[in-house]
Amino acid sequence: MAETIDEITIKYEEDGQLIVDELDKEILTRGAWTTIIFKYRQWDNKIDNFGPDKFTIRRYRKMKGEYKQQSKFNISNKEQAEKIVLTLKKWI
């Protein structure tokens, strides 16, 4: 687990193989509760390569000196991401 917000990552390896490749992240809020949006790609065994870019918003809580994931929302695809952006722009 991460002790600081900047150490939080979704990069994941299994048996030396990179499974989740974190491409970028943006920290939306900082503090005991932090929210981060990640851009990533995931290894796809069917094509023996990484799949398309994906996005996830994750919420972390600092407990006993470490940040632990509390919740997440995975954005299914670029089209859904675009709809979220358009809706937020309309509301704001």
Image (cartoon, rainbow, N blue to C red):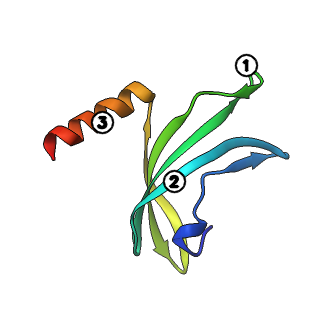
Sequence-first disc among 3 and 1: 1
Residue 4 percent coordinates (x, y): 55, 74
- Mark 2 crowdedness (10 Å alpha carbons): few <14, some 14-19, many ≥20: some
Identify the residue at image location x=57%, y=63%.
Answer: 8
Disc 2 from disc 3: Cα separation: 17 Å
* Residue at the disc numbered 3: 84
Horizontal arrangement in the rendering, residue 76 relative to residue 48 (left or right):
left
> Which image quarter: residue 21?
top right
Foreground: 50 or 70? 50
* Residue at the disc numbered 1: 46
* Residue at the disc numbered 2: 25
Helix, strand or loop status at disc 2: strand
Inspect the image, locate mark 2, and give the three-letter code of the amino acid beneath it: Lys
> Which image quarter: residue 50?
top right
| Residue furthest left in the image | 91
Identify the residue at image location x=22%, y=36%.
Answer: 87
